[in-house]
Amino acid sequence: MAYQLYRNTTLGNSLQESLDELIQSQQITPQLALQVLRQFDKAINSALAQRVRNRVNFRGSLNTYRFCDNVWTFVLNDVEFREVTELIKVDKVKIVACDGKNTGSNTTE
Amino acid sequence: MACVNPVPKLYRSIIEDVIEGVRDLFAEEGIEEHVLKDLKQLWETKILQSKAMEDFFRNNAHSPVFTLPLPNSLHQTLQSSTASLVIPAGRPLPSFTTAELGTSNCSASFNFPGYPIHVPAGVTLQTASGHLYKVNVPVMVTQTSGRASILHPIQQVFQQLGQPSIIQTSVPRLNPCSLHVTAEKSQRIETVLQQPTVLHSGMVDRKHLQNAASDTLALPGNEREIMSEALLSQPESPQYICLPGVVFPPQVSQIDEHREPVLGVSGGVTQNLNGVPLSTGRQGAQHQHMSDIQLHVLKNRMFGCDFVKQPRNTEEPSSLPVSEKDSNSQMDLSIQVTDDDINEIIQIDGTGDTSSNDEIGITREVDENEFLRIIDAGDLKVLEEEVDSISNEASTANSSDNEDPQTDIVEEDPLNSGDDVSEQDVPDLFDTDNVIVCQYDKIHRSKNKWKFYLKDGVMCFGGRDYVFAKAIGDAEW
């Protein structure tokens, strides 16, 4: 079972909103919506693993760190992200990272 | 359309995978095909509204301009696909409108050539009657069997920029079906943009609510989401949503915790873009409701502040009326209250008592004596210390600085307020727009130097999305 981690992304949130609308208009059932989300989990996990190839480097200062249920959550300040093509600077960023060694089921973000 | 950014393409492929993957599921449930199509279109529209448009605009610096004469039947085609026409409300839209389209000032017109025309994103279509529609995604316009139609594979997003009263139905009227596509000057765009947004300083205007686009273009749920996005994302900037006729003034967005009532009313406003006023009862109620909410919010905030300012005392009844007055009077009243406390304490201690300690010892029980003496010693010590500290402080507004419980209280606030700071940070600390969702290969720490080895991540910075296969980072804690 793929991580449900990516549901809190633009893609995931917009899918959930769309599904909510269809549920409210009673065009689909909530159970079906859940299955769609599971399908989304699979699709995005495999797409990220196979279709994305770029690398990013970043540097900043660590404000907080948390490790709970094998999930790391960091908050960094004044971070610079460097890609080959561009440089992105943000004053605050939150990183939520699940264990990448084995893709177990994960119900949290 | 040259897309250097791989994200839109990746997202489209994911969407396709998901839709294809659930097609069987939908069939098993006995759900019709159009529902799946609706889901796909809703999903794509939301994606486009949120961030992909930035990519499209970024890649289309100069928008060509041309006029497309289209037959009357075109609006029928548009009408048949209601879900595909959505008026976006993403926040970057106005800025891009002015920035991107302002870069070029060309305009041209030509007759429909008969072959499919690709209308890139970022152009503004203007009908001969003067209505402006901005194309937010590439559109293919073809002419088949003597009439123009719009291909569905590409999502069409039109944004009407002005004259909302003209729109009768969900379909932008294209009679006499001559679209003049221009890359407007930024000024012109701004003037047009300001047309539907004249009324926003102050309360939500009734007229705009009446003209609110809960139209068939966007499902009501869509609009709620759009509104909530707008409310949350546009606190004070003048760039508000360009839903036709729907404008939310900055003041409304301040009441974000009470957005439900606002949404409830607006979502319920049926489409009426002809300018015919709806029953004003609803809007009136909403006005009142909102003003009540504002008052309530203000009152709560006032009470909250007052309670914090007040020195601690055990006199609860007196604190309530005190909170309604200004801080000086609060302090005065609280001084009086604490004076009573002081007196009581002193009396209990016996220090203020005229009788001698011997009498206290005689008249009271032995246990009480010991207890009181313990209090005496402790209190005296504390009181002495506080008196010393208070005498050093120059900022207290109280004349009677030697009032011990009050100094006690003043002393405690700075001490304890420091403890609260870290607690307040935690809920806000993790609340940010910039989020990275990924997996970690390895997290390493050496003293306070951290190294991150991450993979398969999606980054969202201020609405813009990025992806990475690998990310390596350093940070110092």
Image: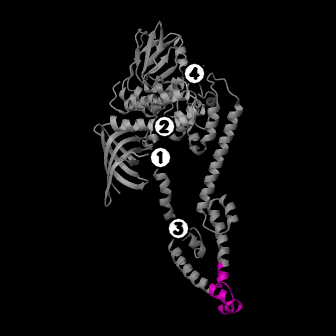
Q: Nearer the viewer, mark 2 or mark 3?
A: 2
- The CA distance from mark 4 to mark 2 is 31 Å
Give, as a three-letter code, the residue at label 3: Ser
Q: Which residues are magenta?
A: B345-372
Label 1: element kind: loop
Residue holding disc 3: B395
Label 4: element kind: loop
- The CA distance from mark 3 to mark 4 is 65 Å
User: Which is more N-terminal, label 4 or label 3?
Assistant: 4
Callout 4 crowding tier (Cα within 10 Å): few <14, some 14–19, many ≥20: many
Give, as a three-letter code, the residue at label 1: Thr
Viewer-proximal residue among B440 and B64: B440
Marks 2 and 3 share the same chain: no
- B466 is within the stretch colored magenta: no
Residue B423 in picture, x, y percent from top left:
50, 59
Marks 1 and 4 share the same chain: no
Question: Which residue occupies 37% across, 37% down?
Answer: A46
Give, as a three-letter code, the residue at label 2: Leu
**The disc numbered 1 marks a residue on which chain?**
A
Residue B73 in picture, x, y percent from top left:
53, 11
Q: Nearer the viewer, mark 3 or mark 4?
A: 4
- Label 4 near label 1: C-beta < 8 Å? no
- The CA distance from mark 1 to mark 3 is 53 Å
Q: Which mark is residue B81?
A: none
- Above/below status of B72 relative to B210: above
Label 2: element kind: helix
Q: Which mark is residue A107?
A: 1
Residue holding disc 2: A37
Give, as a three-letter code, the residue at label 4: Ser
Q: In the displayed structure, does residue B348 sit left or right of residue A92?
A: right
